[in-house]
Amino acid sequence: MSNILRCDLHDYLEIACLYQYQTTLVLSSGEQYSGVPKTTITKNRDGVKYEVLVVDCEGGQVKEIELLRLKSMHVETPHAKFTDVSFI
C-alpha cells in the first residue's frame, strides 16, 4: 500500500483549502471533524514520510489529520465546486 494519497483526491483537498470550504471529514476509524481545511504538510515518523491535512476545527482547535486515514469529505459551503468525496 502506498503512503501517498492519489493525485486526483489530493486536488479536492487543495480546492477545499483554496476556497476555505466548511467541511465535515470522516476518518476510517469513524471519527468526524468539522472545520475549514487550511493546508497539507509532509511529516516524518520513524523515517517514513506521510502527509497531513491541517484543519481549523469548530471550537478553535487545529487538527492535523493523516491523509490516508480519510474516508470521506462533505462540503457544507453553498455553491461549492463539489460536495462529497470518497477517499476509499
Image: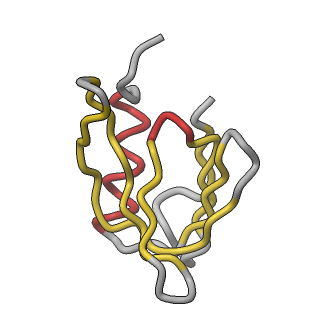
Rendered position, 8 above or below 42: above
Rendered position, 8 above or below 20: above
Q: Nearer the viewer, residue 43 or 53?
A: 43
Q: Where's residue 11, x and y in %?
A: 34, 43
Rendered image quadrant of residue 48: top left
Rendered image quadrant of residue 66: top left
Q: Residue furthest front?
A: 46
Identity of the residue drawn at 37% across and 74% down: 20
Rendered position, 2 above or below 17: above
Q: Where's residue 10, x and y in %?
A: 36, 40
Rendered position, 40 above or below 18: above
Identity of the residue drawn at 41% across and 48% down: 12
* Residue 62 relative to residue 79: left or right: left
Identity of the residue drawn at 66% across and 52% down: 26
* Residue 80 relative to residue 24: left or right: left
Identity of the residue drawn at 33% across and 64% down: 17
Q: Residue furthest bottom?
A: 59
Q: Residue furthest right?
A: 30
- Number of labelled discs? 0
Q: Nearer the viewer, residue 10 or 78?
A: 10
The colour scheme applied to this rendered structure is: secondary structure
Quarter that holds the C terminus: top right
Q: Where's residue 13, x and y in %?
A: 39, 51
Rendered image quadrant of residue 47: top left
Q: Residue furthest top?
A: 1
* Residue 23 relative to residue 12: left or right: right
* Residue 70 relative to residue 51: left or right: right
